[in-house]
Image: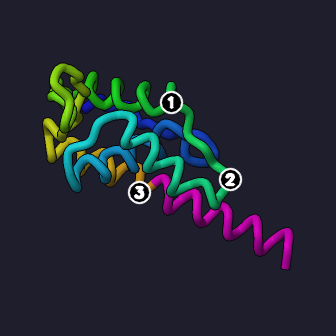
Amino acid sequence: MPNKRESTGFLIKQRAFLKLYLLTSIEKERWYGMQLLDELKKAFKPYGYIPQHSEIYRALHELMEDGILTRRKVKEDGAKYKEVAVYSIADKEQAKAYKKLVKADLDRGEQLIRKALTDNFS
C-alpha cells in the first residue's frame, strides 16, 4: 500500500469514495467491473450521483497497482467463450488499512458538513 494519503482535499475525493465501496462489495463476494458499476449506480441514484464507467475502472486499476486487488478471467455463466474479469482481495490487511484511512477522512468530512449546516442554516 502506498504511503501517501488518498484524500487530502477539503472533503473526500471521488476516487477514494469509489474505492471504499468497491472494496466493500468485493469483500462480500466476487464481482466483475460492470456488476460493480451497475450496483453503485443503483445505490447512489437517489442521491443524484452516477459514477462513471471510467472512474470505476481507474479505481479498480489503482487498487490492483497498490497490491490490494487481483483480477482474473473467468467464463461468464452460461457462455461458452465469453470471459469476464473478476476482482478479488489480494491483501486483506492492506484493504483494511485503506478503508480505515478513508473512514478517518469521512468522519472529518462529516464534521465539516455538520459545522457548515449549523453555522449557515440554523
Looking at the image, residue 12 sits to the left or right of residue 96; the answer is right
Q: Report the number of numbered marks.
A: 3
Q: Is residue 35 above or below residue 47?
A: above
**Residue name at image x 25 percent, y 32 percent:** 1
- Mark 1 lies on residue: 53
Q: Position of residue 17 (x, y in %)?
A: 48, 46
Magenta-span inclusion, residue 54: no
**Residue name at image x 19 percent, y 36 percent:** 78
Magenta stretch, main secondary structure class: helix
Q: Which is more N-terminal, label 2 or label 3?
A: 2
Judge by depth and name the residue closer to the eye, 27 or 117: 27
**Residue name at image x 33 percent, y 51 percent:** 99
Badge 1 crowding class, 10 Å Cα cut-off, few under 14, some 14 to 19, many 20 or more, is some
Q: Which stretch is magenta?
A: 105-122
Q: Which is more N-terminal, label 1 or label 2?
A: 2
Query: Mark 3: which secondary structure?
Result: helix
Looking at the image, residue 61 sits to the left or right of residue 51; the answer is left
Mark 1 is on which residue type? His
Mark 3 is on which residue type? Lys
Magenta-span inclusion, residue 112: yes
- Mark 3 lies on residue: 103
